[in-house]
Amino acid sequence: MSLPYTASFVRQHTHELETTLHTSAYYVQRQSYEPNESVTQLEHLCEHLDIYKEPLTVRNTGIICTIGPACRTVEMLEKMIINGMNCARLNFSHGTYEYHAGTIENVRQAASNFKKRRSVAIALDTKGPEIRTGTLKGNPNGEIQLKKGAEITVTTNVEYKEACDDKFLFVDYMNMNKVISAGSRIYIDDGLLSLVVKEIDGSNILCEVENGGNLGSKKGVNLPGTAVDLPAVSEKDIMDLRWGVDQGVDMIFASFIRDAESVQEIRKILGEDGKNIKIISKIENHQGVQNYDDILNESDGIMVARGDLGIEIPPEKVFLAQKMMIARANRAGKPVICATQMLESMIYKPRPTRAEGSDVANAVLDGADCVMLSGETAKGDYPIEALQMMHLIAREAEAVVFHRQLFESLRLYTPTPVDSARATAIAAVEASFKTQATGIIVLTITGRSAQLVSNYRPRCPIITVTRNAQVARQCHLYRGLFPIHYPGELKLSSWIDDVDERLNYAMNVAKARGFAKTGDSMVVVTGWKSGSGFTNTMRIINCL
């Protein structure tokens, strides 16, 4: 838990933060628009990529960081915000409610310590309905060795729950013997160990060790190709979700979603108090991929969770699933996150492998709205360096995107007729290309207008001004949205003056962050009167 802060400490610390944050590569990002008359993707790649030039645009991809012992203090969280963390992820596979409450308090304290409070989203990642082995006999913290070719009995007999050895291995999925068949494979500990099922005898499943190695207690189990019938939401998940509602989290990362009904069940659990919490479905198994379109339709967003997915489906198919899921989410206008092992080697080393750098870049090029760091920030030796590297790679990758072609593709897939808000969003993005605008300013209440603009992937940042703090935080899910929680009170007497004040506020922020300078073209999206649902106006202004 964070220590209480005195008023004098906060004032002094805020000054120090405001002095240092402008030196970060994330907060101040210069833009330099050059005309791009390329007709094809090939011409764009041949003529406009140069490793000796700075990226032309700001980083539009969101970065989600898992919070753990390596970065949980207020001071470290401040540094992460300065260096580009947009969303803090809490992994409920580990930790107590007291621990997570302390983390939430620290994140909010760190965000509020700046002179102008930062909008940092908080995501609760559920444990989900997973399968685990039992505890080793005699030494729960030790390991046993499974040798290739040896026989071992996997059992649901609770007598072996705390008495596992190299002959009998307990698993906590009681229906396992009913859904698995001879010839099936059982993967343990992220696929490091594999067993082949030979025979099923009641609660015992006789297996042969295919890939051996050391096995510890309570390791994860995957059953690729087997249709499991675990409940969509465990009892622990239900308690965690209700706790998250009470804590005011902004989004749920729902683990092991297999069908649309699972999402509906989570929405019911969140109830009226949690109706505004975004549900991001994690696709981690065969069933999730098979039912992807239904899950996408029911969810607020998608996470391509490649850890378990890479065990459930063949490794050579993972990139296909990633590209398919991201593309369909883009087409549907839903935010999509790419996650797991993106900069894994940076847990222990200050630089990533070349393959990891390419992996992050390709996720951005595929169309991911956000990329995620897991162990790199939660337990790694270099959490800040990993975040900085993620920022730099994402920004460079975005310079490769042929935005004109991407915009035309997305517009082509938009069914007609469209409502006024979507039509205005399309017009705003096209105008931003034609005028080489350095930003699109969107005044919004619910965030929908800004999200529609994001759907069509403008090259420039979308400066999103809202009075709703939660909407501002949730905007980080969408590529290109730079949310501003506007502090001013609504002026009922003069709506036009209120619009002008918010526009001036947005322009000042854009100039402070280096996005724009006086005289630059900017596109503005507003409604025709006060309230939500009236967006129909697009105009072009010069930054004051």
Image: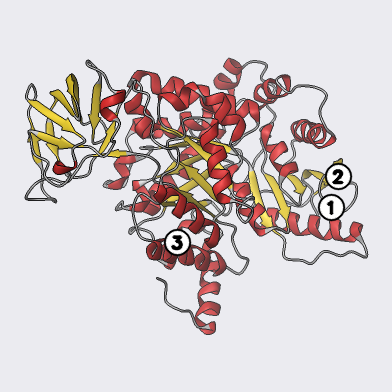
Q: In this view, does 11 lie above or below 362?
A: below
Q: Tag 1, which secondary structure? A: loop
- For image coordinates 55% across by 21% down, the residue present is 45
Near mark 3 (Cα within 10 A), the count class, few <14, some 14-19 or many ≥20, is many
Residue 445: image location, x then y, percent:
76, 52
User: For the residues carrying marks 1 and 3, which lies nearer the camera in this image?
Assistant: 1
| Dot placed on the residue nearer the N-terminal end, 2 or 3 | 3
Marks 2 and 3, Cα distance to the nearest angstrom? 38 Å
- For image coordinates 51% across by 24% down, the residue present is 291
Amino acid bearing label 3: Leu
The color scheme shown is secondary structure
Please indicate whether residue 126 sits to the left or right of residue 517 in the image: left
Residue 422: image location, x then y, percent:
78, 33
Q: Can I make out residue 49 in this image?
A: no
Residue 357 image-quadrant placement: top left
* Outermost residue, right side: 493
Marks 2 and 1, Cα distance to the nearest angstrom? 7 Å
Label 2 close to label 3 by CB (< 8 Å) = no
Residue position marked by numbered label 3 in the rendering: 77
Residue position marked by numbered label 1 in the rendering: 531
Marks 1 and 3, Cα distance to the nearest angstrom? 35 Å
Residue position marked by numbered label 2 in the rendering: 534
